[in-house]
Amino acid sequence: MPKVNLTSKYLENLDPPEKQKEIWDKKVEGLGVRIMPSGYISFFYRYRLQRKNQRDKIQRYTIGQFPGVELKEARKKVWKLKIKVAEGEDPQAQKKARKNRKAPATLEEVAEKFKEKHLPGLRESTRRGYRSRITKYIVPALGSTPIRSIEKHQILDLLERIANKQGNPTQSNRVRAVLSSMFTFAMERGYVDSNPVQAIKPVTKEKSRKRIYDKQELKALWEAFEKQAEPMQSLLKMLLICGQRLSETRKMQWQHLDNGVWKIPAENTKAKRVHYVPLSDLAFNLIDNLAPLTGDSQYVFESQMNKGNPLVSFSKVASRIRNESEVKDFRIHDLRRSAASYMAKLGVDRTVLGKLLNHKGLAGDSQVTAVYDRYEYMDEKRRAMIKWSAHINDLIYGQDEAKITKIS
């Protein structure tokens, strides 16, 4: 049996043999590659299982098809299997036992298991995105197909259709990520042996969005905000004034407002840490005006259609804003980016801006500073909010001053 210093390039350039052929990896003992006349290439692990009072048993464990399973993954898998064998376990027998259990047959059945077991551990916004893509794209296209039968070309067809025919390359890449996560989930439970999505590159490269609204656009957007019903109107304004994320702002609670400071709990932040935002008069007045409407609720921006819960649906309002403001490419997240850009132009220090936005990389945080000072950089953040609120006031109302609510 020939041994070779295997590389991915070597495997990619293998010619199909006239009959089945096996080669062995020089780097990792026991790792083999099976090449079929059809061109099918798969990894397997050959091991000797020692048994008391019996002859040793030679077993083979199929790892998966190349390139769905990459060489480095196969090597890592063999090392894990070696540990099991050394501990007296039989990986192949365990694999057969898993297969004998009733496993989800179709991708749709796996999707249901995935939503039940995997999604609860993700952020709420991520869960919504996963569910939406599974329901809208993945299940309609592949749901009835046995998951073990799904091939690379079927997945690629789906992704190209979304990117090219539907003109949504970003969505195509998001669907690819969800599908890959689903196949990894299925592998961990023994439903499939490999993840074919890993062999598929994103159909297109995404361009990071850098949209920042100019002064005329901000004024037009603000005027469009004022045409929306409360509390949606105030929520949109608050996103621009405070520059915080939509997922955090919409969950603002009355109990988290104290002495002109908005405390965002760790569980609501992307950075998973408590975040303190000083409120300018412009922000505080918006909140104060909502008290008659939502003051008896838990949430400042309580949905008027679904009492007891924060506002949740924004696609229709974003569409209305585009039409009413004539800013045709309006996206809610661009408000945060625009706020950050204008504050930087106003001279706000990069580190202070990072603290205000609760952005880990930009803030230069360390665990020590986060633990020591729960109100770190509060004075600097307050001054930044004063500058930005004054700028908004001047732009929207022709005023040149904005005061911060006193913080004791």
Image: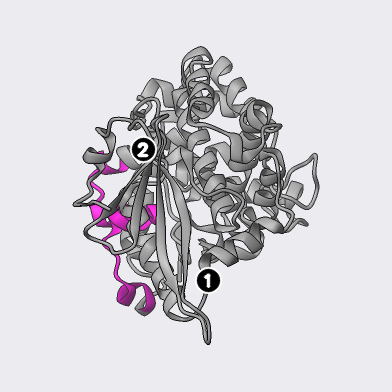
Most foreground residue, 332 or 228: 332
Left or right placement of residue 384 versus residue 60 in this view: left
Q: Earlier in the sequence, mark 2 or mark 1?
A: 1
Residue 258 vs 135, above or below: the answer is: below
Q: Position of residue 392 (x, y in %)?
A: 41, 36
Q: Position of residue 127 (x, y in %)?
A: 61, 48
Quarter that holds the C terminus: bottom left
Residue 397 vs 108, above or below: the answer is: above
Q: Farthest bottom residue?
A: 53
Q: Residue at x 46, y 81 (%)?
A: 87
Most foreground residue, 394 or 231: 231
Q: Amino acid at mark 1?
A: Asp
Q: Amino acid at mark 2?
A: His
Left or right placement of residue 273 versus residue 191 in this view: left
Residue 161 vs 407, above or below: the answer is: above
Left or right placement of residue 356 versus residue 92 in this view: left
In the image, is residue 266 part of the stretch drawn in magenta? no
Q: Which residue lies under the disc numbered 2?
A: 391
Q: Main secondary structure of the magenta part?
A: helix
Query: Which region is colored magenta?
Result: 343-371
Q: Which residue lies under the disc numbered 1?
A: 90
